[in-house]
Image (cartoon, rainbow, N blue to C red):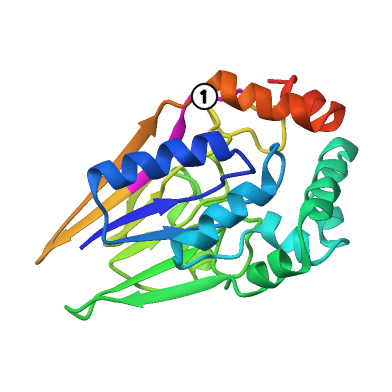
């Protein structure tokens, strides 16, 4: 069984196309999307439709939840530029698009044939806006995980690729497809990396391996998509 984990696409269809092409080339039995599909980038509808076409399990990220609840963004940030971008993305979506997002779930447990469990969520099991990091203290991590046990946990949200072993659990963050960060920013201005990110998890019998992947994508195509959206998206991405 080979599973591809993707997360934090953030309306970057050019990067998502590159990642999906690489997954098809490498081969995967399933794809799991760990959330945050439609906001902050130029192509929210295209990204959402590409994920819908995969017919894959989808986790509800905080930015996905912002599409369903207009007021929720104010519990996350007071930065008006981000609030405006989230509102703009929501305005691009049809009722059918919103209905698709409503089918996302905040936490999923997948049971494997050998009896092992894999758990997927966006930030933490109870809060998609919580940061699970390589340096989160073990005691704090136990509280975040609410004493859950699994063979593997997949999460996103931080935009930083990570693989960590915690009390026998392998924790994997595939990084960000659309907005990968160079380092943890804790709400400050990030520095973006010039590639798209995802992870592959291979399970063969009792063996488990994880590959963190970085894929190049056409920056000029992405820039043209930004230019077509006007000043709101352009000004956001000109910060980087």
Check disc 1 and report the residue beneath it. Answer: 193
Quadrant in the picture for residue 123: bottom right
Q: Which residues are magenta?
A: 191-199
Q: Using the rendered view, name the quadrant where residue 204 is placed.
A: bottom left
Tell me where residue 217 appears, x and y as whole percent: 46, 27
Residue at 36% of width from left, 75% of height from top?
A: 110
Please, which residue is most extreme toward the left here? 205
Residue 154 lies in the magenta stretch: no
Quarter occupied by the N terminus = bottom left
Q: Residue at x 75, y 24 (%)?
A: 227
Q: Position of residue 65 (x, y in %)?
A: 71, 63
Seen in the image, is 4 located left or right of residue 122?
Answer: left
Res 38 seen here:
no
Does residue 31 appear left or right of residue 175 in this picture? left
Q: Position of residue 138 (x, y in %)?
A: 43, 56
Q: Are there few (<14), some (14-19), or many (20+) residues within 10 Å of tag 1?
A: some
Nearer-the-camera pick, 79 or 234 = 234
Identify which residue, 134 or 162, lies in the foreground.
162
Left or right: residue 217 versus residue 73 is: left
The residue nearer to you, when weighing 39 against 107, is 39
Q: Is residue 168 above or below residue 234?
A: below
Residue 45 against residue 1 in the figure, above or below: above
Taking the spot 70% from the left edge, 54% from the top edge, the residue there is 63
Tell me the element at label 1: loop
């Amino acid at each position: 069984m080979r599973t591809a984990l993707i997360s934090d696409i953030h309306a970057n269809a050019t990067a998502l196309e590159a990642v999906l092409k690489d997954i098809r080339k490498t081969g995967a039995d399933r794809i799991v999307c760990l959330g945050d599909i439609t906001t902050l980038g130029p192509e929210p509808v295209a990204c959402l439709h590409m994920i819908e076409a995969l017919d894959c399990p989808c986790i509800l990220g905080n930015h996905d939840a912002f599409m369903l609840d207009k007021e929720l963004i104010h519990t996350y940030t007071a930065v008006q530029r981000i609030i405006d971008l989230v509102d703009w993305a929501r305005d691009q979506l049809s009722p059918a698009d919103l209905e698709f997002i409503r089918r996302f779930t905040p936490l999923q447990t997948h049971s494997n044939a050998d009896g092992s469990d894999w758990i997927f969520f966006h930030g933490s099991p109870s809060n998609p806006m919580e940061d699970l990091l390589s340096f989160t203290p073990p005691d704090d991590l136990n509280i975040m995980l609410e004493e859950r046990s699994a063979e593997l946990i997949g999460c996103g949200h931080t935009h930083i690729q990570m693989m960590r072993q915690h009390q026998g659990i392998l924790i994997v963050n595939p990084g960000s497809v659309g907005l990968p960060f160079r380092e943890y920013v804790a709400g400050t201005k990030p520095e973006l990396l010039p590639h798209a990110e995802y992870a592959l998890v291979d399970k063969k019998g009792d063996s488990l391996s994880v590959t963190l992947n970085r894929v190049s994508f056409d920056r000029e195509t992405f820039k043209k998509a930004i230019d077509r959206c006007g000043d709101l998206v352009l000004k956001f991405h000109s910060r980087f």
